[in-house]
Image (cartoon, rainbow, N blue to C red):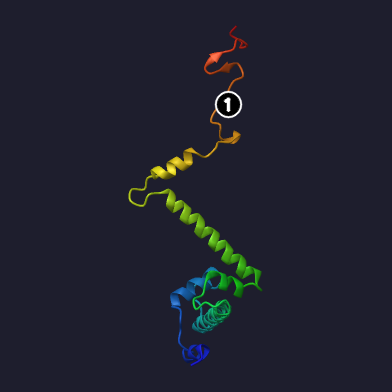
Amino acid sequence: MEPRARVGRNRGQQNFSDQELQHFLFAHGDVPNSLEDTKKVFDELMTDFITELCFEAQRSAQLAGRQKIKLDDIKFACRKNPNYLGKIEETMDKKTQIEAARKLLDQNDDKITKSNVKALEEEPLGDADDDMELDARTIGGKSTGTGAGK
């Protein structure tokens, strides 16, 4: 059976929970309690969008000789809509930032791990990282004799 025909069998059934739909609608400007018809229509629209996006990504993967869909296939399916593509890129950037932050903290005791401390110590310091400004009259804690005290 054609995959799209299988999707058609589930017509009329709600794929997302009422609470998920309500939160999404409210977050995008709807009233706190949406009408049931609004939720049903929105559920159908989201289901159709996700289904078509997945079919387009599957087509891209199939042309590449793969059976599994990769993120690049989804990006390729969204290539004509820069808003979708930008949101995917933004989400992936945020994911890498979160993963880097998780690596910095040790999950067991919430302390910075030794390897990460070593990586932080090796980071070169710039001019903006100076903690205190040095007086031109003092070098290595000794006065050079140009101060007001002499």
Q: Is residue 71 above or below residue 1?
A: above
Which x, y percent locates residue 29?
A: 57, 70
Q: Three-letter amino acid code at disc 1? A: Glu
Residue at the extreme top of the image, as rendered: 150
Task: Tell me if 35 is positioned left or right of 106 in this view.
Answer: right
Residue at the extreme front of the image, as rendered: 65
Q: Secondary structure at mark 1?
A: loop
Determine the image quadrant of residue 139.
top right
Which x, y percent locates residue 13?
A: 45, 87
Q: Nearer the viewer, residue 94 or 126?
A: 126
Which x, y percent locates residue 101?
A: 46, 51
> Can residue 108 be seen?
yes
The residue that disc 1 covers is 133
Please name the residue shown 48% across and 56% down the image. 98
Q: Is residue 90 above or below residue 57?
A: above
Determine the image quadrant of residue 146.
top right
Task: Tell me if 132 is positioned left or right of 107 in this view.
Answer: right
Q: Nearer the viewer, residue 55 or 86?
A: 55
Total numbered labels placed on residues in the image: 1
Please name the residue shown 52% across and 77% down the image. 66
The quadrant of the picture occupied by the C terminus is: top right
The crowding category of the residue bearing disc 1, from other C-alpha atoms within 10 Å (few below 14, some 14 to 19, many at least 20), is few
Q: Nearer the viewer, residue 58 or 8?
A: 58
Q: Is residue 99 above or below residue 128?
A: below
> Can residue 29 be seen?
no
Q: Is residue 7 above or below residue 63?
A: below
Which x, y percent locates residue 33?
A: 49, 75
